[in-house]
Image (cartoon, rainbow, N blue to C red):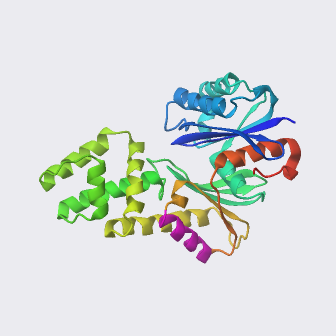
Amino acid sequence: MGFVVGLDAGGTSTRALVLDLDGSRLGAGVAGGANPNSHPPEVAAAHVRQALTAALDGLDPAKVESGVLGMAGSSKLTDPAVAALFEAAWSGAGLRCPLRVITDCEAAFATGTASPDGTVLVAGTGSIAARIEHHELVSTAGGYGWLLGDEGSAFWLGREAVRATLAALERDGLDEMTTAVLARAAIPDLPRRERWRRLITVANEAAPIALAAYAPLVTAHATAPSAERIVMSAVRVLADLAEAARPADDHAPVVLMGSLVHANPLGTRLRAELAARTRAPIHVATEGAAGAGWLAAVKILGDRAPRPT
């Protein structure tokens, strides 16, 4: 029997999975982020090759019959030069089957359910909701990136945490979360106005995506008033995003994917909010590479392809 390969390439990490056609796992690999919008394309492609090489260790790449790369920022591959980098990474790992690129939304939905139709909400470094029909993305809501949107994402949470800290310094009202933000930014115990200046400088000196590093402080200190407000806002905007992608009175499954879905209390509250808004089944997906691998198997076996174990 041959193998299939699935990859999930996000802004923070890339995961590769090799599956037998019976759904059993044969190998796995992890590398850095491979979203070509948030990383230089040559770096992103190199991370794809690293993850593939690790997953295929001890296996014959020539036996891979089908492969799917689920990618955040997949539209970047419409640039022939960028597409060539990923094709080179694919063949450089020893794969002979064609490279099939899909969105991270399609991979996430396939991870959470075998249903061909439904809605997926991805809330990780970025955020997006999408409508899936016949295993393919047909429409989206959000997903505009850090500059234009990504409300409710880890980037958004981190930015809101820094903004809340700046506001707290303006009125001398620090709590547990805002104090943690100052510690994470390595701001020393200086006069309040000086800490305000330094936090602005630290935040602006780093790459914008680095603001996502402050997101864990929101959930870690969720009982603090500043964090509570951010969590409530995130739940509302993410639920609104999922609703915007769904037709009215739709009962097809909703799949949730991304680090924030598992970050409590935000994830728990989000599931409760969606359950109050819809009667559709709600599934939580944990590994986009598994969904990509299953779709690779579907290409060979059709919908009867076994689900990854």
| Magenta-drawn segment | 264-277
Q: Residue 154's spot in the image, x, y percent?
A: 46, 53
Residue 231: quadrant of the picture: bottom left
**Among all residues in the image, which is located at the extreme front?**
58
Q: Is residue 253 magenta?
A: no
Magenta region, main secondary structure: helix
**In the displayed structure, would residue 297 be above or below residue 112?**
above
| Residue at horizontal 32 percent and vertical 66 percent from the top | 226
Left or right of 236: which side holds 254? right
**Residue 274 belongs to magenta span:** yes
Residue 249: which quarter of the image? bottom right
Above or below, comparing residue 118 to residue 15 in the picture:
below
Image quadrant where residue 232 sits: bottom left
| Residue farthest along the left direction in this orientation | 191
Q: How far across and down, in percent of the image, does residue 21 sit?
A: 83, 42
Q: Quadrant of the N terminus?
A: top right
At a point 49% along the width and 53% down the height, the residue shown is 150
Pick whichever, 128 or 256, lies toward us. Answer: 256
- Point 86% across, 41% down: residue: 300
Q: Residue at x 59, y 28 (%)?
A: 82
Q: Position of residue 285 (x, y in %)?
A: 64, 57
Residue 58 located left or right of residue 72: right
Q: How many marks?
A: 0
Vertical order, 196 against 272 (above or below): above
Percent x, y for residue 131?
A: 68, 58
Q: Is residue 252 left or right of residue 158?
A: right
